[in-house]
Amino acid sequence: MSLSHIVLSSGRSIELTELRMSSTYGGMLEGYPCKPVNDRKVSGLWRQAEGAFPTTPVHLVPPTREYPDQTAGAFGPVEVLPSVACIGAFHSTVIAPELDPVLHRSALIVVWFQAVVDAPSGEDADLALRSIRWEELAQDHEV
């Protein structure tokens, strides 16, 4: 059973079967959100996804970065990522037409950041998520 369905810009329907969410800056005890901190947050989430799903390709949707305060601190200006870090396991029908669609599916792990604690769903999902190039990024596997 899927958590939600998303219709990609290409028209392909994908299912979200697992979703892990965390606070982007949860546990940050010192410092402030800036490019070096955010780059580590993004790469750390990527590594976490690779470790959790070692046999499935991982794709990062580049996060938006906001600059609410142009005053530079010791590590540069304040740079803020969306408040929710997400890792989602998505599945769809096969990519390769020669594979049996009953015995095979395609899968992709997606890493992204979003502003709200909601599962993306339908055609209302963020455009960056709906723009994933599934046929290039996902991998077929036997069920």
Image (tube, rainbow, N blue to C red):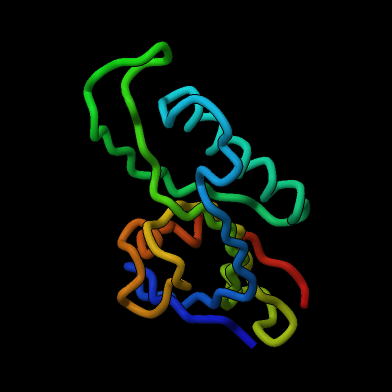
The residue at 22%/23% (across/down) is 70
Can you tell which quarter of the image residue 86 is in? Answer: bottom right
Of 108 and 103, the residue lying toward us: 108
The residue at 64%/88% (across/down) is 1
Q: Position of residue 127 (x, y in %)?
A: 30, 61
Q: Locate residue 16 relative to residue 100 in the image: left or right.
A: left
Q: Locate residue 80 relative to residue 14 in the image: left or right.
A: left
Can you tell which quarter of the image residue 35 is in? Answer: top left
Of 62 and 55, the residue lying toward us: 62
Q: How many marks?
A: 0
The residue at 37%/57% (across/down) is 115
Q: Position of residue 40 (x, y in %)?
A: 56, 30
The residue at 61%/50% (across/down) is 58
* Residue 7 visible in the picture: yes
Of 74 and 12, the residue lying toward us: 74
Spot the residue most to the front.
Answer: 29
Location of residue 25 with respect to 31 vertically, above or below: below
Q: Position of residue 60 (x, y in %)?
A: 51, 47
Location of residue 99 with respect to 66 vertically, above or below: below
Can you tell which quarter of the image residue 52 is in? Answer: bottom right
Spot the residue most to the top.
Answer: 74
Q: Position of residue 34 (x, y in %)?
A: 41, 26
* Residue 137 visible in the picture: no
* Quadrant where the image shows the C terminus: bottom right
Location of residue 110 with respect to 92 vertically, above or below: above
Q: Locate residue 25 relative to residue 124 in the image: left or right.
A: right
Location of residue 101 with respect to 8 vertically, above or below: below
